[in-house]
Amino acid sequence: MDTEAQLPKPVAGDLLQHKMYVSRERYLLIARRAKAAGMSISKYLNALVDRDEVDADGRPAWAPTAISTQPTLVDVEHAA
């Protein structure tokens, strides 16, 4: 998959907008943590990515080595 070809058009400067799906509880958790850190949700999520440890292949250290074949929540929602 060529992710560069799928990039959305910039919204402001070089910033791209990404839509994500989370439960209400997860959203509130993210919002509370961002507020506690004195950040917007966007800045908070960017900070998490910046601090994510990756291996030589770019895979997050916490991720399983095998790519999951289980459908994601988004896949399940769109199939319904």
Image: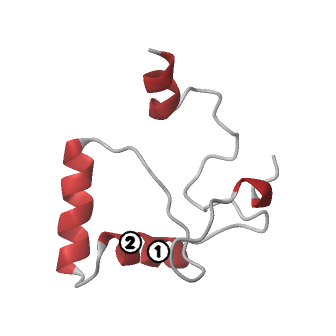
Q: Name the quadrant containing residue 56.
A: bottom right
Marks 1 and 2: CB-CB under 8 Å? yes
Residue 18, horizontal then vertical, whole percent: 50, 58
Q: Name the quadrant containing residue 34.
A: bottom left
Rendered position, 63 above or below 30: above
- In the displayed orientation, state which residue is furthest to the top: 80
Residue 48, horizontal then vertical, whole percent: 45, 72
Crowding near the residue tagged with mark 2, few <14, some 14–19, many ≥20 C-alpha atoms within 10 Å: few
Rendered position, 39 above or below 17: below
Crowding near the residue tagged with mark 1, few <14, some 14–19, many ≥20 C-alpha atoms within 10 Å: few
Q: Residue 13 vs residue 69: left or right?
A: left
* Residue depicted at x 48% and y 24%: 78
- In the displayed orientation, state which residue is furthest to the right: 2
Labelled disc at residue 73: none
What is the secondary structure assignment of the residue under circle 2?
helix
* Residue depicted at x 27% and y 61%: 30
Query: Residues under labels 1 and 2: Cα distance?
Result: 6 Å
* Residue depicted at x 60% and y 80%: 14
- Which circle, 1 or 2, is nearer the viewer? 2
Give the amino acid at mark 1: Asn
Labelled disc at residue 42: 2
* Residue depicted at x 18% and y 55%: 28
What is the secondary structure assignment of the residue under circle 1?
helix
Residue at which label 1 appears: 46
In the image, 7 versus 33, the foreground residue is 7
Give the amino acid at mark 2: Ser
